[in-house]
Image (spheres, rainbow, N blue to C red):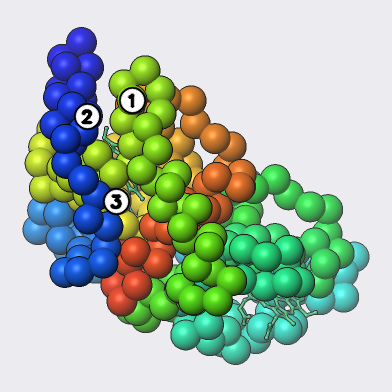
Amino acid sequence: MAGYVEMRALALGAAILVWGGQALGFEPVSGYEFLDESTRAMQDDEFENPGMVTVDEGRDLFNERRPDEEASCASCHGEDGEKLDPAVIARYPIYDEHLGGLATLQDRVSYCWENRLDRFPLPYDDPQLVALETFVRNKARGEPVNVQTDGPMSPLIEKGRQLYSTRFGQLDMSCYHCHVQHQGQMLRGQKLSQGQANGFPEYRLGTGRITSLHHRFGECFRSFRADPFEPGSEEYRLLELFVMQRGNGLPIETPAVRF
Ligand code: HEC
Ligand code: HEC
C-alpha cells in the first residue's frame, strides 16, 4: 500500500495548484535528461542500443517483397526508405483528410500496408506495425519534433489537453499530476520526467521489450489504478497529439532506452 499513499499524496498536493499550461516559460525536456550516464550511453551507441534490433526487423519488413505481391514498401519509398524525408516524419501526428483526420505515424504505415500493398489490415500496435513505425521514425533520429499546432489541429490539441488533465480511476489522478506538477520527483524509485514522447517506440530495460507510445499510456493508467483505453483509440490519438506537440523542438530519439 506504500504506493497508494505515495500517489494519493501526489494527487492531493496538486489539487490546490492551477495548471499554468504551457503558455509562458514551458521548456520541453526529454526523458533522456532524466537518465543516468550508462543508460544514455547505451541509447547513444547504435551497437549497444537494444532497440536497434526492432529497427532492423522493421527494415526487413520494409524491404521485403512477398512472393505473391508486386511491390514492397521500398518500391515506393526507396531501398531502406532512402526516399523518406525526416522532416516529414517529424511532423507526425498529422491532420490528413485522406486518413480520416488526425493520423499518427502508425496510422500512416497501416494505411500504406492496407491500401498501397493491399494487405490484410492489422490491429493497432501489431508487432509488425510497431517494428515498421520504429524503423521509419528512426530514419528521422535527431530531427526536431515539429507537430502542427494551428488550423484544424488546435481544437484537437485542446481536447487532448483536457484528457491530459482529466482525473481517472480510484486515485483520481491525471497525467498532469505526475508529469507537470511533480516532474523531477521520485515515485517508486523512478524519477518522474515530463512524460515526453520523442523517443517512441522505445526500448524498456524493465521489460526487455520495445514499447509503443499507446502501450506506455496504458502502463501509466494502470500505475494509478485507472482503466486504460485501447491502443489506437480516439483518446490515445488525442493524447499522442497533445504530448507530441508539447515536445515540439525536442530531437527524435527513436529507439530511446528507458527503464
Ligand atoms: C504504391 C506506393 C506505396 C507503397 C507500396 C507504400 N507507400 Fe507509403 N506512401 C505512399 C504515398 C503516395 C504516400 C504519401 C506521400 C505524400 O502524401 O506526399 C506515402 C506516405 C508514407 C509515409 C509518410 C511519409 C511521407 O513521405 O509522407 C510513411 C511513413 C509510409 N508511407 C510508409 C510506408 C510503409 C511502411 C509501407 C509498406 C508497408 C509503404 N509506405 C508502402 C506510397 C506508398
Ligand atoms: C502516478 C504517476 C503517473 C501518472 C498519473 C502518469 N504517468 Fe506517465 N509515467 C510515470 C512514470 C513513473 C514514468 C516513467 C518515468 C518517467 O519517464 O517519468 C512515466 C512515463 C511516461 C512516458 C514516457 C516518457 C519517456 O521519456 O519515455 C509517457 C509518454 C507518459 N508517461 C505519459 C503519460 C500520460 C499521457 C499520462 C496520463 C494518461 C500519464 N503518463 C500519467 C508515472 C505517471
Q: What residue type is labelled 3?
A: Gly
- Please state, as top left, top right, bottom left or bottom right, where the C terminus lies in the image: top left
Q: Which amino acid does label 2 sit on?
A: Ala
Task: Tell me which label, 1 or 2, sits earlier in the chain.
Answer: 2
Q: Position of residue 28 (x, y in %)?
A: 23, 66
Q: In this view of the protein, which residue sits in the foreground, 109 or 146?
A: 146
Indicate yes or no: mark 3 CB to ligand 2 under 8 Å.
yes
Would you call the spot at circle 2 few (<14 residues within 10 Å), some (14-19), or many (20 or more)? many
Residue visible at 32% across and 66% down in the picture: 247
Indicate yes or no: mark 1 CB to ligand 2 under 8 Å.
no
* Helix, strand or loop under label 1: loop
Structural distance between the alpha carbons of marks 1 and 2: 7 Å
Residue 188 in view, yes or no: no
Residue visible at 49% across and 31% down in the picture: 228
Q: State left or right for residue 218 relative to residue 121.
A: left
* Helix, strand or loop under label 3: loop
CB-based contact (under 8 Å), mark 1 and mark 2: yes
Disc sitting over residue 195 in the figure? 3
Residue beneath label 2, please? 11
Disc sitting over residue 172 in the figure? 1
Q: In this view of the protein, which residue sits in the foreground, 90 or 172?
A: 172
Residue 154 in view, yes or no: yes
Q: Which amino acid does label 1 sit on?
A: Asp
* Helix, strand or loop under label 2: helix
